[in-house]
Image (spheres, rainbow, N blue to C red):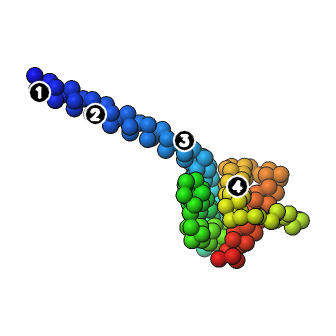
Amino acid sequence: MMVASLRRRLGMLVILVSLVTVCSAVAAAQASRSISAAARRLDDFNKQGNKVAIDQMQSEMNGRKPTKEELRRITRLRAEIKEDLEGLQSGYNEIVEALGGKAAAPPTAFAEAVEKIHKRSSRLRANVDIPQPKEPLDLPPFTDERTELRELCLRIFAFLTNPIIETPNVLEVGAAAKAGESLAAVLIISERIRQRK
């Protein structure tokens, strides 16, 4: 009798733990949906990018095979671009998670992420042939740091989900211009935040 009661209690405990685990997983999945969508696009970009870069280099060289030095250069460039895109994604994630917390995050919580974002976006601007905005961007003055950080995250998200980042082998002039504006805004906003630190 005691064994049956103990088995029943153990069975109920297993069911309860399973239910809590499932509910936690569902909540975590909902919270990270926007973050994982950008990460998935970044992964697709990385997979397509290597082949596109080598094909483009070969076509630029009138069909001749690239030299070892040219291949090393393009491999280094691809690695830097991948590192920079992942760095932007990582900085975005850090800020979104800190902003999403119920308690106000200390200003130092954002300093490293903003520094990383500025460094990565600066190198991306130098390494990727994205058109720069012809006119200076008209960004509004921000009243507080949280608003400015939210705007920074929106601009990073717009850049990472831009069609030229998602599918780099397809060139859309309008999308390229928007990517240039988004990246320029990321640089300007991150520099504003850095100057106040």
Residue at 57% of width from left, 61% of height from top?
104
Chain-order first, disc 1 or disc 2: 1
Estimate how packed mark 3 is, as few (under 14), some (14 to 19) or many (20 or more) residues with alpha carbons within 10 Å: few
| Measured Cα–Cα span from mark 1 to mark 2 | 16 Å
**Nearer to me, 108 or 32:** 108
Residue at position x 58%, y 53% from top? 100
Q: Which mark is residue 81?
A: none
Q: In the rendered structure, find residue 3 and report the number of the disc placed on it.
A: 1
Whether residues under marks 1 and 2 lie with C-beta atoms below 8 angstroms apart, the answer is: no
Measuring from the top left, give residue 105's x and y in whole percent.
56, 63
Separation (CA) of disc 1 from disc 4 = 58 Å
- Which numbered marker is on residue 30? 3
Numbered circles on residues, count: 4
Which comes before the other along the chain, label 1 or label 4? 1
Residue 73 visible: no
Percent x, y for residue 22?
Answer: 41, 36
Q: Could you tell me which residue is drawn at 89 percent across and 65 percent down?
A: 135
Q: For residue 14, which numbered disc appears in the image?
A: 2
Label 4: which residue? 154
Dot placed on the residue nearer the N-terminal end, 2 or 3: 2
